[in-house]
Image: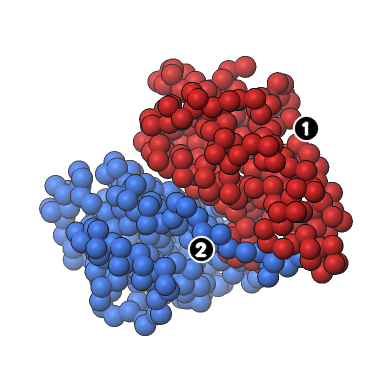
Chain colours: A blue, B red
Amino acid sequence: MNSHNIQWHSHSIDKLKRVQQNSQKPCVIWLTGLSGSGKSTIANALEKKLFENGNKTYLLDGDNIRHGLNKDLGFDEHSRVENIRRIGEVARLFVDSGHIIITAFISPFLNDRYMARNLVAYGEFIEVFVDAPLEVCEKRDPKGLYKKARKGAIKDFTGIDSPYERPLNPELHVKSDVTSVEEICLIIVKYLLENNYIQNNILSHDISVQSMDDVSPLSEKKPRSYSQAEYELNAYIRKNYPEWECKTIQS
Amino acid sequence: MNSHNIQWHSHSIDKLKRVQQNSQKPCVIWLTGLSGSGKSTIANALEKKLFENGNKTYLLDGDNIRHGLNKDLGFDEHSRVENIRRIGEVARLFVDSGHIIITAFISPFLNDRYMARNLVAYGEFIEVFVDAPLEVCEKRDPKGLYKKARKGAIKDFTGIDSPYERPLNPELHVKSDVTSVEEICLIIVKYLLENNYIQNNILSHDISVQSMDDVSPLSEKKPRSYSQAEYELNAYIRKNYPEWECKTIQS
């Protein structure tokens, strides 16, 4: 038996129905940055805020992935790619289930992040570069990992003896050394609101008072082909939820 | 770097908060049975019914798993175990996110299903044995796989040249050769209602008129230790949602 013998069924309850049920446009919020840049802290605070707004969210991070689904993986080249691939695939399932899924992984390589982006439809992947200078992250060293890496007790540690490839064109670029966690969350929430991923239930009074100085919005996107399902979803949303129409898809 | 260097954060939004948000007790509905026994058809019809009742559900099957997360896996011994392990881990994540997650895989081996069961808390795993005689399944042969297996074009095909280990003590045992898909769905929904996984919104008039003759309820359960988190969740539910208290946990 091989995968050619696996046939596709169409599921009765599809992404369109879930968009209706959850009143949100599902997406991946992919946080990337050095260890200690604040990804997990931001992810938790962001999820709390979205939950309070009534959104259906879930958070993938080292805790629930490395100890579970990916516990068989090491940290070699193959494992590193496979780690991100599986996270991307699980994120895709959560998007298909109608969730806003937040991921918090260093994910240091452009190719790996590009792979994850391409697992979901155009407009469903929001890359957030959580940027802080290495010196700041190393000084924070919340898990003591930089210390271990400097001593050589950890090999291939991002920023020390393995590179971090900065995002070339992320949807959002935030600087966690000069912007507070709370402000970064609001920047992300504002992006979600402006691009109609979510509707504004209780968040507006927070948003309006915040500075947006630290946001580098996405200026141009790489061309990317649409799938039939994307076209259908977007057409459906345009027709039935004109107020949700996603600007990033529109452009 | 190794997994000892990964630390656990506590997430702000945990399973308890999701139970509140979704008004349902998350669980895995694990359908097991021969190819052609009707698992996918039942899974789809069940998800439709639960969706209409306002529940948050998702369906994992060969379509969204074998073409995505598990596309790197073959059908050898290691791959077979790893296939079910990953499905179990993804199901665990969906349960953690508050979903009722339905899985539709042959999953022919006791040990593999036992592994999947043990990834979630006691009372969160509902094994449904979709039982039909091999002759019936082979006659249906919706994907033409039995024909290929008989010709030797597919090796290690369950029921032909690889065994199916019948569940010893499933939560539900339904016979798809004598019970209709609609009735089987109602049997499962009735179990969910009676054990307070879901609340009855629009389903009751359907349920009351159905025969339950084909249900073999779980008579005795294997002893299984509780985790701290399970105790906390159950205590929380008992306190705050007495009407949801799960009888399978209670006993």
Q: Are marks 1 and 2 in contact (CB under 8 Å)?
A: no
- Kindly tell me whether residue B203 is visible in this rendering: yes
Instruction: Decide: few, some or many residues near mark 2? Use Cα within 10 Å; few <14, some 14-19, many ≥20.
Output: many
Tag on residue A88?
Answer: 2
Q: Which amino acid does the dot numbered 1 rest on? A: Leu
The one of B134 and B190 positioned closer to us in this rendering: B134
Residue under the image location 38 percent in, 60 percent down: A27
Name the chain under label 2: A
Q: SS for tag 1? A: loop
Relative to B206, residue A76 above or below: below
Tag 1 residue: B168
Instruction: Decide: few, some or many residues near mark 1? Use Cα within 10 Å; few <14, some 14-19, many ≥20.
Output: few
Relative to A239, residue B50 above or below: above
Residue under the image location 64 percent in, 47 percent down: B38
| Left or right position of A117 against B183 | left
Residue under the image location 25 percent in, 76 percent down: A251
The one of A190 and B216 positioned closer to us in this rendering: B216
Q: What is the x, y in percent for residue A151? A: 60, 62
